Image (cartoon, rainbow, N blue to C red):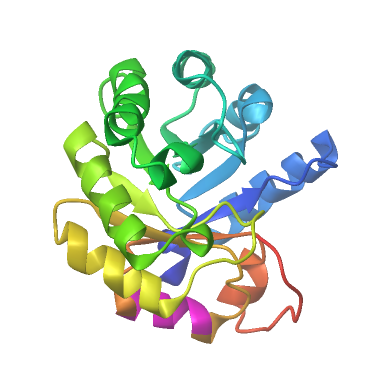
Amino acid sequence: MNIAKYIDHTILKPETQKKDVVRICDEAKEYGFYSVCVNSSYVPLVKEQLQGSDVKITAVVGFPLGAMDMKAKAYETEIAIENGANEIDMVINIGALKDKEYDYVREDIMRVVDALQKDILLKVIIETSLLTEEEKIKACELSMEAGAHFVKTSTGFSTGGATIEDVKLMRRVVGDRLGVKASGGIRNYETAIAMIEAGASRLGVSASVAVVNGMDTGNSGY
């Protein structure tokens, strides 16, 4: 298995500098990761660094809390795509989901879907560590109804990351209609493989080089 092709090589920490983004772009080209995942302000730099390669560009939207106005998420999506993003990872409004404001959550996702251009994929981050099983199922259902392409476990900035149980649950709910992205806390090859076997079709990893080299970074985080 070429695990590198499952990986969105990720750098989202607030202290990230341009030199850090350049480094992960170089690593993505060297190891053949599927995409580089960054905050939207870095999309132009990533596009420049990845020119001539087949590595995709993923931009996060509404990150990491998901609580901004839905129009702001849609606008951020438009700008990220204009600047070169191939994929969008958006955070749902978690409070609205927990309040059972399902129409709002669905429209929030649909606004971003409507802002996509042809062949641009949307992954919906549901932040599983903050949800009950019922809420996880509902978030996946709303994502399907809204026209998303993936559901994603976590931002990596909340109380927990991906778990095998959550990936299995999400895969069971979405079936083969959507992809499932496991993210947060994947720090070694064994965990990455376990997530794929549980049903993940993409992995969000910051310790990507260690994962493909079979090492354990031994620290937490995205």
Question: Which of the 4 image quarters holds residue 198?
Answer: bottom left
Residue at image point 34% right, 35% down: 101
Q: Looking at the image, which is closer to me, 66 or 207?
A: 66
Residue at image point 48% right, 76% down: 192
Image position of 108 (left or right of 94)? left
Position of residue 32 relative to residue 64, above or below, is below
The quadrant the N terminus occupies is: bottom left
Image position of 79 (left or right of 142)? right
Residue at image point 27% right, 42% down: 143
Give x and y (percent) for residue 60: 55, 36
Give x and y (percent) for residue 86: 42, 31
Question: Which of the 4 image quarters holds residue 186?
Answer: bottom right
Residue range of the region highlighted in magenta in the rendering: 191-197
Position of residue 63 relative to residue 113, above or below, is below
Give x and y (percent) for residue 10: 62, 51
Name the magenta segment's main secondary structure. helix
| Residue 116 appears anywhere in the view | no
Position of residue 102 relative to residue 134, above or below, is above
Q: Is residue 42 magenta?
A: no
Residue at image point 46% right, 60% down: 128
Q: Looking at the image, which is closer to me, 189 or 109?
A: 109
Q: Is residue 192 magenta?
A: yes
Question: Which of the 4 image quarters holds residue 182?
Answer: bottom left
Image position of 94 (left or right of 39)? left
| Residue 69 appears anywhere in the view | yes
Give x and y (percent) for residue 147: 21, 34
